[in-house]
Amino acid sequence: MKKLRIKDIANDLNISKTAVSFILNGVAQEKRISEELVERVERYIREVGFRPSPIARGLRTGKSNIIGLMVESISDPFFATIARLIENMAYKQGYRIIYCSTDNDTEKTKELINVLRERNVDGYIISPPPGVEKEINELIRAGLPVVMFDRYLPKVKTDYVVIDNEFSAENATRYLIHQGYRNIAFITFSSSLTQMKGRMKGYRTALKEEGLKPYVMEIDFTPEEKVMVQGVREFLAANPKLDAVLFGAIQAGSCGLKAITQLKLKVPQDLAVISFDDHDIFELFSTPVTAIAQPIDKIAHKVISILLERLEEGDNAAAPKEIVLKTKLKVRKSSVPAK
Amino acid sequence: MKKLRIKDIANDLNISKTAVSFILNGVAQEKRISEELVERVERYIREVGFRPSPIARGLRTGKSNIIGLMVESISDPFFATIARLIENMAYKQGYRIIYCSTDNDTEKTKELINVLRERNVDGYIISPPPGVEKEINELIRAGLPVVMFDRYLPKVKTDYVVIDNEFSAENATRYLIHQGYRNIAFITFSSSLTQMKGRMKGYRTALKEEGLKPYVMEIDFTPEEKVMVQGVREFLAANPKLDAVLFGAIQAGSCGLKAITQLKLKVPQDLAVISFDDHDIFELFSTPVTAIAQPIDKIAHKVISILLERLEEGDNAAAPKEIVLKTKLKVRKSSVPAK
């Protein structure tokens, strides 16, 4: 689409820039611009496909065309990739994204919600920590659409896009059982959030049906990766019976692979491995690692299109969209049949 | 540090919340609060270590306590990690960060500079694309401090924090030569930016001194990773004489390792490898990959402390700080001596 400037429209129609500007800003009547001139400009715009700059559009609509994106941590490749895709898709629609990391910290998130609100964002995309129900409900009441992703808050009625966590974990655990593994650990981050609870439940369900014993390790997240690697190493060393492990998140997986390397364990001979979230480290590890791949593109696409729909149509009243997407088990050599 | 609220101060000193608020907001005199009361409150705050909320501080100082951080791409692990560290460090000092990705796109960056300016940020941290000299100079003239990192714009006089790119590339190339490799490729992204020009120069210098032939491949960046991997694969296949390769950036390295895996080349027997930027994929690759590690923590720390100094002291007039940091060659098995 051709990008026209106010100057171009004024020149082509041989009218003043001020008049064009008044019309674009929706104050034609107030400024006593004739109906006929308004129509001429509008027809011209339709014909040549004028795409106004977000700022010009903001002037007309009172909107900023800025979306606030709050992720748990931008250094987590899952969130970084989603953020990037959302940004690209939004940009093409004339929206700009500003983002920040919540650290899954309730107080910090509350504050950042306000920081963004004071910066006049039109809407929010949030992977929320627990405890911000009140703040999000306030945004919604104020007419600011909020789309949650990765997890949702059961007490907040708003759109969300998540994956089928319970099924994904159950399916991966079943896969390991089917391949002949019996002592399967689940190593994950401790969390009360929906996505992590779902993964834990799926893992336990699969084991229970086969009468197998669960081995669960919950890592306390710390920015000191060495500490987490050390923790996983101690857990693996203390449970020599283990023949397989399911990692509950990408960062649990990367800590785990480091621990496995340090312990000189062979994958899959000593320990079969599957991890949530696909990533280069799993593809390129000495034994390529089977991964539960989230449909990243689809998540980003759903999230931004739901939000833009709310923004463009202003239909905050419509029923919340609760989207649950499927994952894909990308089978690699780390989970071949046990001997 | 204990976090006190206005209410707590008022209760403890048995004075009104309004008075405390006036004092914190710097309007005590105007509101006819006695000098004695101001002193009592100030002493109390010093003693118990009151950390005012950024918003309260903003009210007093007219500042937003928000910093705009513009990186090339937040999905690049180098930028994501730096962003995260800067955010953490800033948060502890009462500053909030909002970030966005420039895509190295000049027009997009110009627009985002304005988006952030309209959102009232106090200062900017930017890894700039080419062509935004005018816009950055305008910010500086308007009293908004700007710190550049990763690369700098020679025509902009402002603080920057970079690494010694030329030396790092020269040193890594020399290391490969010293290990017995003779046909060493440099695979990198095409770029006119200072950091990439420096890396190219260092590579060429090392080869020239030994009378060796350069093999350069410049990848055109595209979000379609497969296309880039394919390009590297074709380059490697077309140059069977190569016995080593230096990758000029983390994403060039990850594409390269995928190409190497697809071609079933053995590292280092068929091809020795060194890459710029350290990352899990290099540590965990089937043959651990020697990496030129940037001092990420130090870069983040320098960037944020220079900016906060400018903000706190308002000394925009002081001479720009031009910081060049050293990298570290993390030697792993991918570059053992050639046979």
Image (cartoon, coloured by chain):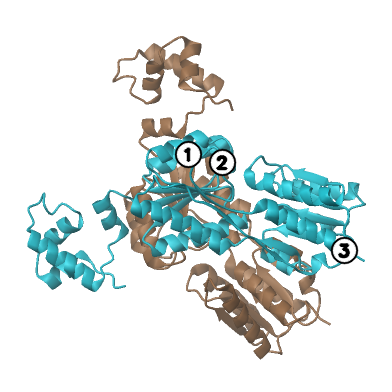
Chain colours: A cyan, B brown
Q: Is residue A179 visible?
A: yes
The answer for which chain carries disc 3 is A
- The residue wearing badge 3 is A266
Task: Name the mark on residue A136.
Answer: 1
Name the amino acid type tagged 2. Leu
Name the amino acid type tagged 3. Lys
Do residues under tags 2 and 1 come within 8 Å of each other at their CB atoms? yes
Q: Which mark is first along the chain, 1 or 2?
A: 1
The answer for which chain carries disc 2 is A
Residues at marks 2 and 1, CA–CA distance in whole angstroms: 10 Å
Left or right: residue A275 versus residue B192 is right
Task: Name the mark on residue B312.
Answer: none
Q: Quarter-wise, where is residue B227 in the image?
A: bottom right
- The residue wearing badge 2 is A153
Residue situated in front as seen by the camera: A222 or A151: A151
Element type at marker 1? helix
Residues at marks 3 and 2, CA–CA distance in whole angstroms: 40 Å
Q: Quadrant of the N terminus of chain B?
A: top right
Q: Is residue B102 visible?
A: no
Left or right: residue B277 versus residue B15 is right
Element type at marker 2? loop
Residues at marks 3 and 1, CA–CA distance in whole angstroms: 47 Å
Q: Which mark is first along the chain, 2 or 3?
A: 2
